[in-house]
């Protein structure tokens, strides 16, 4: 079983600034993956970044990076140089090794202001 | 990249009728698909896991007789909401495990029952 907590229901940032979204989770699986998805107003789910739990190195994808603390079961997302197109709802989601199946956090609504 | 197509994008039906939602993997085979339900500004809640050629696995609290799932081929899963009522109005999203082992999502279906 997996549980996910995103403690920031809403966040706001100015364009070009940096913002960090927090996520803590719990899982009974020994091998798992962690994902951040964004859901813009179109409601299409878009993969932002993923992290394999067995890897110590934090994943990076252009302006997006994670701070993965396995022992603390923390998986935060940092967005650098925020852009207006980053405005969306962001979901943290751990998944098992058959990681089509995901458990989603409550979500954080991020608004980027010009 | 892998594409999942969901149809229709939106549907309005009368209370008491049934409505079918299709989820297709366009360029890959998906032995497993997932169906989620999402209320406005809330998280995605897993309803069921759809397995090709076998019965779906429903999450606790989901009525299997109301939400019928059929996964008759490697590229198509369908969700039928039977005897729909206004409380079934929601946004329904499907996903499939793609060839690179990540989840790919359909565009979602907005169901309104009047």
Image (tube, helix red, strand yellow):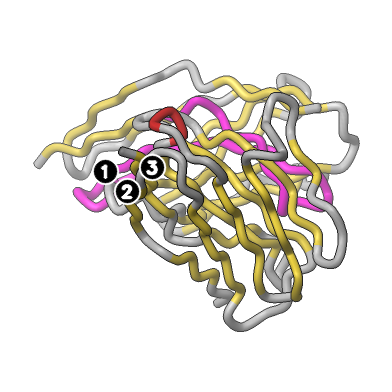
Residue drawn at 57 percent across, 43 percent down: B36
Q: Which mark is residue B12?
A: none
Residue drawn at 62 percent across, 51 percent down: A50
Q: CA distance from mark 1 to mark 2?
A: 7 Å
N-terminal of the two: label 3 or label 2?
2
Give left or right: position of B70 versus B1: right
Q: CA distance from mark 3 to mark 2?
A: 15 Å
Q: Position of residue A78 (x, y in %)?
A: 44, 38
Q: Are marks 1 and 2 on the same chain?
A: yes
Q: Position of residue B56 (x, y in %)?
A: 79, 50
Callout 1: helix, strand or loop?
loop
Q: CA distance from mark 1 to mark 3?
A: 11 Å
Residue drawn at 17 percent across, 35 percent down: A14
For label 3, the residue is: A79
From the image, which quarter does the N terminus of chain B lie in?
A: bottom right
In depth, the one of A80 and B83 nearer the eye is B83
Q: Position of residue A42 (x, y in %)?
A: 30, 53
Q: Are marks 1 and 2 in contact (CB under 8 Å)?
A: yes
Mark 1 or 3: in front is: 1
């Amino acid at each position: 079983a997996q549980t996910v907590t995103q403690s920031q229901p809403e966040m706001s940032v100015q364009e070009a600034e940096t913002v960090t979204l927090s996520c803590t989770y719990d899982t009974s699986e020994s091998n798992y993956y962690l994902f951040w998805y964004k859901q813009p107003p179109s409601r299409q789910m878009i993969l932002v970044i993923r992290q394999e739990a067995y890897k110590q190195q934090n994943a990076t994808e252009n302006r997006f990076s994670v701070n993965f603390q396995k022992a603390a079961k923390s998986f935060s997302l940092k967005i650098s140089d925020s852009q207006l197109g980053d405005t969306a709802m962001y979901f943290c989601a751990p998944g098992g090794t058959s990681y089509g199946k995901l458990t989603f956090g409550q979500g954080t609504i991020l608004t980027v202001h010009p | 990249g892998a594409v999942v197509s969901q149809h229709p994008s939106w549907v309005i039906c009368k209370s008491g009728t049934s409505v079918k939602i299709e989820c297709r993997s366009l360029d890959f085979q998906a032995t497993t698909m997932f169906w989620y339900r999402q209320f406005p500004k809330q998280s995605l809640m897993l309803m069921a896991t759809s397995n090709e050629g076998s019965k779906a696995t429903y999450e606790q609290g989901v009525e299997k007789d109301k939400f019928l799932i059929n996964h008759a081929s490697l590229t198509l899963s369908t969700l039928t909401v039977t005897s729909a009522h206004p409380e079934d109005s929601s946004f329904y999203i499907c996903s499939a495990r793609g060839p690179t082992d990540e989840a790919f999502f359909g565009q979602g279906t907005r169901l309104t029952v009047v």
